[in-house]
């Protein structure tokens, strides 16, 4: 089982907590401790023996501590292979002792980045000695133990106690993987910071990183393992009631928040099912917004995720309880609303912050590769262009913009029918635009036939033929917004004009897959 | 503009090519070069002056070169701040000269990992000194220039020539970002390797990395920038004809290859539109397979991506040319087929290898976080369970499995109708299962009504109510496969039995979003 006894250790930690979990064990097994600066003082203050690093190397600290541990005596001590005879002769000849344990944790750079410390100051905090100690010990895991997190002190103490002051190879290998993760992660943050500073978004070597937040019960399906990682310090969600969220819940919740974040502050409700909206309203009144979202497709809403852009009040809570939803996400809940909602055993209630940052980049893992792109944060890049003879009213224009905005978040091909600031039919995920038109119209005709005559439609991409437009007009739609740009635009506009409808071009497309 | 003159450099390179691009410039500006081992020999053999590193530090190499540059004289030379008075006094007192330039490239670890070198041997190749030199110089970019890639020698020479032997701050900062990318990337590969060795798939710190393959014209939409990164050395695709592939092309191509890879060797054709299949056939005969894929939804197939699991022959090429496709992907093309296909100006022809590795993990970027999961590589985890009174024939069973397999790749809710080994109707991306049933049936009734009476249907998840099943049976479907597990299973089975149809439970769900 390849056990290696620990006789000498270097400890250099930015986070000085938890040392009491490991120092007694090191003392018990007579481990010599080498340290410097703040760590040295801390260990001394805890009444443990400790050799100062500069005394150990015989080389005084220089450049305000920028060069401390970068010394051959240290690295020969860490990197030698114990079973390599010539290595051991080298050490003896130079009287360099073995170093068996490295305990290092790095300055919490990520936290400082998130705290928006000034760039020049941040750079000063980049640790050079620490990662090198970690990497050297981690490379030589066959002989050396490396601890890169304060959460592993207990495990080390346990390991040493179980093995008479030694560690097992399986422990050392695990700790080595963690150490290289910590140095890789650290440099990933630094290079992101530098790239941001010089405005490079997609460098030759792209490193994406995240910290595990939660082991989910499973992934999209029960036979897949699933996990949630956060890229920023703050996930932006707070569960206040109910059982654990699933992979698909998180996916739906964030899909909903993306849409809600495109609305005015406190306006609107979205109902999500299978990562697609099945009802959206941007109405200011939360009760009306919810009712309008629900009526858009009450069958699909069943078991969905509701995202509300304001604090849920009692009246809405009563209404929400009439339908089975898996998750309700909102900007808080009034206490009487909470009381009502908590009557539902299987519901999850989630608070989402005002300031949730959405990813700036979007990655799509395909084959053995990934596609990277900017997140889609623009609605209409240039000016709207009215291409029909008839012009839209101001109210129609507002409704067109609303519908086009919702389109952006519906999987392609996407057609959204809206009445005022609420959807009345959503056609999503079809390989043909005509089919999406049919689905959207069917929904509207099925659930809200009375609202279709005054409705507008939006398309996420141009109509390749007039057939889709004709389908919408036949159903009663009077006003259509779309990017335009097809070679058949002329025929499409002709069909619109012949029926006396209105058409607006955005020039901006919104595919989403 | 903060120019810094280069007077002294350390060069330590694993890849020794391209040195002729930079050594003449260094000589021209009288830069002192320090080097060791193979790099030292190489520079000497090229007739340039060079000081040996061990002579420079006064400390001989140890442990077969494991400890060479890790010396305070080196790091004080790199890390001192020029405008910091006390730093400069420190240097003078110890007679340590400044080091202004570091040229290091690391052992191509990634390549060796992909070459499947033995784990123990790979570990030996982990570089400790190199990354430390890079990181130290990259940290001190305000004073020090760092070059981490052989592709940047020319840029450095150009920079020095333009600035009388100095470099600008913008150049140094860019090179610093690249250096931290290279060290972060390096450690990301190492930690992945270690985690794989100890079977940890989702560590606390997840680092995902890729190398830029291509700047795409744009992302999913023209206002988004788009890029392709590869995680492995081999992308697995080879473009043999036509204009550049777009972001959406790549997405569709890989969606198609995933399905094709689930078929027997050389069997089948898939047509993809908006990342969803709109026609799939697993037939052995490529001509029949294509015809069957096309007829499933000829309207949607327009402008799609066709993936063929065999080398395209002349007969198929003629047929392919009758429809407008954006991309044809296959395992090669016969020369006469190529000739025919190249008549189409706007087509792209792509070869895909036999051994394309698909990602083992799947990441979904949501909010400020990402969801991580195993790729969905299982079709049916346990045994099939026949739950209807009537049993399926062997042919039906084969067809059911085919349909259920296609379902796995269709966005949820997914319903797939199949006749034998070809789809005849695909309902995708709907928030309600009933709607997906309707869409799949509509397609089949529209394009192949004659084939529906002998057809089977698959559902990616259970039917929450009998309505969807009833819809399928009413259309003429005789045999249905689904995971099962709804509280309404009993009623669903009852509806199946009453109509004399067959139902099979898989116990395995296949949501895809």
Image: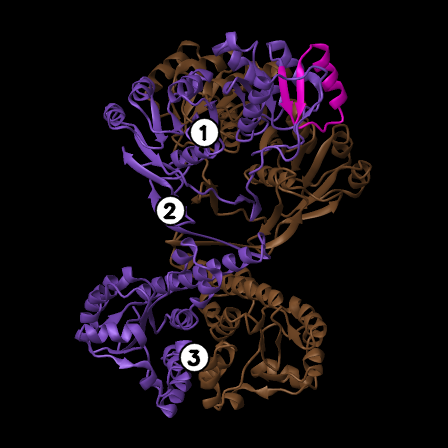
Chain colours: A brown, B purple
Whichever of labels 1 and 3 marks the residue nearer the N terminus, that label is: 3
Left of A489 or right of it: where is A166? right
Q: Quadrant of residue B299?
A: top left
Percent position of residue B23, x then y: 21, 70
Percent position of residue B446, x then y: 50, 10
Left of B72 or right of it: where is A31? right
Circle on res. B234: 2
Q: Quadrant of residue B344?
A: top left
Q: Quarter holding the C terminus of chain B?
A: top right
Q: Is residue B490 magenta?
A: yes
Q: Which residues are magenta?
A: B479-505
Q: Residue at x 70, y 69 (%)?
A: A154
Circle on res. B88: none
Determine whether B369 is above or below B68 in the image. Answer: above
* Residues at marks 1 and 3, CA–CA distance in whole angstroms: 57 Å
Circle on res. B274: 1
- Secondary structure at numbered mark 3: helix
Q: Is residue B312 magenta?
A: no
Q: Are marks 1 and 3 on the same chain?
A: yes
Residue A337 is at least partly visible in this image: yes
Residue highlighted by disc 3:
B63
Q: Quarter holding the N terminus of chain B?
A: bottom left
Q: Are marks 3 and 2 in contact (CB under 8 Å)?
A: no
Percent position of residue B235, x then y: 38, 44
Q: Residue at x 37, y 38 (%)?
A: B353
Residue A65 is at least partly visible in this image: no
Q: Nearer the viewer, residue A300 or A23?
A: A23
Q: Nearer the viewer, residue B475 or B110?
A: B110
* Residues at marks 1 and 2, CA–CA distance in whole angstroms: 25 Å
């Amino acid at each position: 089982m390849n056990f290696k006894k620990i006789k000498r250790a270097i400890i250099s930690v930015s986070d000085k907590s938890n040392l009491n979990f490991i120092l007694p064990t090191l003392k018990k097994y007579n481990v010599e401790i080498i340290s410097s600066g703040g760590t040295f003082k801390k260990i001394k203050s805890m009444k443990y023996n400790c050799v100062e690093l500069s005394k150990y190397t015989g080389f005084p600290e220089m450049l305000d501590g920028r060069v401390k541990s970068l010394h051959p005596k240290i690295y020969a001590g860490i990197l030698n292979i114990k079973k390599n005879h010539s290595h051991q002769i080298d050490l003896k000849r130079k009287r360099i002792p073995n170093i068996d344990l490295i305990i290092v944790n790095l300055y919490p750079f990520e936290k400082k980045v998130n705290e928006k410390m000034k760039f020049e100051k941040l750079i000063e905090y980049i640790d050079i000695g620490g990662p090198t100690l970690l990497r050297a010990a981690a490379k030589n895991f066959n002989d050396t133990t490396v601890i890169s997190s304060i959460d592993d002190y207990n495990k080390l103490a346990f390991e040493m106690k179980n093995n008479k002051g030694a560690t097992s190879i399986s422990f050392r290998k695990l700790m080595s993987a963690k150490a290289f993760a910590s140095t890789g992660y650290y440099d990933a943050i630094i290079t992101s910071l530098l790239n941001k500073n010089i405005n490079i978004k997609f460098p030759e070597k792209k490193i994406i990183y995240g910290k595990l937040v939660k082991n989910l019960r499973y992934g999209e399906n029960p036979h897949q393992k699933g996990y949630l990682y956060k890229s920023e310090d703050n996930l932006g969600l707070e569960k206040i009631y109910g059982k654990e969220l699933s992979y698909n819940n998180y996916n739906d919740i964030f899909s909903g928040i993306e849409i809600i974040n495109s609305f005015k502050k406190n306006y609107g409700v979205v109902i999500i099912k299978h990562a697609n909206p099945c009802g959206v309203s941007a109405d200011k009144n939360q009760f009306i917004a919810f009712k309008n979202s629900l009526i858009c497709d009450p069958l699909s809403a069943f078991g969905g995720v509701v995202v509300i852009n304001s604090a849920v009040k009692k009246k809405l809570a009563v209404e929400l309880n009439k339908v089975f939803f898996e998750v309700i996400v909102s900007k808080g809940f009034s206490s009487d609303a909470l009381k009502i909602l908590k009557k539902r055993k299987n519901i999850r209630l989630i608070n989402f912050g005002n300031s949730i940052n959405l990813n700036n980049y979007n990655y799509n893992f395909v084959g053995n590769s990934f596609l990277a792109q900017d997140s889609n944060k623009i609605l209409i890049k240039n000016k709207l262009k009215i291409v029909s003879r008839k012009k839209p009213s101001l109210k129609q224009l507002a409704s067109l913009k609303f519908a086009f905005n919702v389109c952006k978040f519906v999987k392609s091909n996407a057609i959204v029918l809206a009445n005022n600031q609420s959807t009345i039919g959503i056609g999503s995920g079809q390989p043909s635009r005509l089919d999406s038109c049919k689905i959207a119209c069917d929904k509207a005709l099925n659930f809200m036939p009375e609202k279709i005559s005054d409705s507008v439609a939006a398309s996420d991409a141009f109509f390749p033929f007039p057939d889709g437009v004709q389908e919408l007009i036949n159903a009663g739609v009077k006003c259509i917004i779309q990017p335009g740009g097809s070679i058949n635009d002329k025929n499409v506009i002709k069909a619109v004009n012949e029926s006396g409808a209105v058409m607006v071009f955005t020039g901006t497309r919104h595919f989403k897959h």
